[in-house]
Image (cartoon, grey):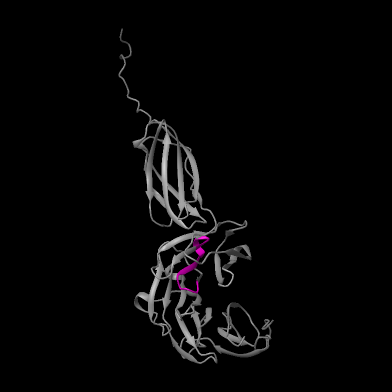
Amino acid sequence: MRGGGGGGDTGGLHAPVAAGVGGDGSVFVADKVRKQVLVYDEDGVFRYAFGGGGSEGGRLEEPAGIALDGSGGVWVADRVANRLRRYTAAGEPAGEATAAGAFALKGPRHVWVEASGTVWVADAGHDRVCAFDREGRGLRTIEGGLAAPGAVAVDTAGRRAFVADTGHDRIGVFDAQAGTFLWSFGTPGTGAGELRQPGGLALDTQTSVLYVADTLNDRGQAWPLRLSTAPDLIPPRAELGELPYSVERGAVVTVRGRAVDAHFAKYRLTLAGGGTSSVVTESTGPVWLGDLGLMRTSEFAPGTYRLELVVEDRAGKVGRDSRFLTIVPKPVPLVAVPGPALGSR
């Protein structure tokens, strides 16, 4: 189909940002400039619009996300009004999520509705995603380690939540019930499998493929996924952050690292050299890797060491990355020694 087209006609689009498809094939398009949701039939013929500028009486300030539920309801995230509204398929207001207290929204974006009726919204301004029941009551949140998430998608079993972690250029995978982090994939960049501000997600549950809108790379990418409890097929890759080539003994060095493409289980950071090996830090549970800790070089003798990060996924696959670091002796301060007085013999 082809509908809209920014013209003067009633159904012309100006800045479409999201779309959803109804059970009868109708297409609902959120247009942030028109401040409306425009509805087309399956052939692209304009039918009607609802919303319009404002914050009362079912009006919209800036629709940013849209999704349809199984009972014919249309959920729309209003980014400016900080609301998640529900409409009938005919465009009549039918309530809204109770976005207050612990579930208050700030700049909500993408909306996803599970088969069970649970409604998810990317609460970008609060660096989290929120889940509401079909009546709009707050259920739970996923937060911690996210930066301005732009989208969320949940598998048909309601078990895994895939989050476009826009600010970190990656996709995070979480336990949709407990909210705990499982693993992540994608890495910043412009190459295949790399992302720059991913802003949209679509999950094909029949083929187990996740489609990602790679915003700043002006493209879409697709990842085959396993939606069962088995680990992902992609082996993990460890990445250590940049380190200085050498430091004085006694300096404190901040070490950064991460696991890429990992159904993540644990990591270990070691420093080896001079016939010895020491564990700097380690974890036995799934975590976001970031600042791995402070390494105090006063505990090591001067010399050249290899700092190695090892990540291991739940299938036992391992990824490694290492850097060399030279610890040099701390300079001994010069002490002035009094000499003979001028003119003395």
Residue at image location 46% in from the left, 76% down from the top: 120
Q: Quadrant of the N terminus?
A: bottom right
Question: Which of the pair 63/212 is nearer the observer?
Answer: 212
Whether residue 21 is situated above or below residue 320 in the rendered picture: below
The magenta span reads 154-171
Q: Horizontal and vertical percent for residue 323?
A: 49, 41
Q: Quadrant of residue 338?
A: top left
Whether residue 173 is situated above or below residue 95 in the rendered picture: above
Would residue 214 appear left or right of 79 to someone viewing this image?
Answer: right
Q: How many marks?
A: 0
Q: Horizontal and vertical percent for residue 122?
A: 47, 72
Q: Quadrant of residue 16?
A: bottom right
Whether residue 286 is situated above or below residue 114 in the rendered picture: above
Whether residue 32 is situated above or below residue 209 in the rendered picture: below
Q: Quadrant of the C terminus?
A: top left
Residue at image location 47% in from the left, 84% down from the top: 85
Q: Horizontal and vertical percent for residue 211?
A: 59, 68
Would residue 342 appear left or right of 59 to someone viewing this image?
Answer: left
In the rendered image, residue 49 lying in the magenta stretch gets the answer no
Q: Horizontal and vertical percent for residue 80?
A: 48, 78
Question: Which of the pair 70/241 is nearer the observer?
Answer: 70
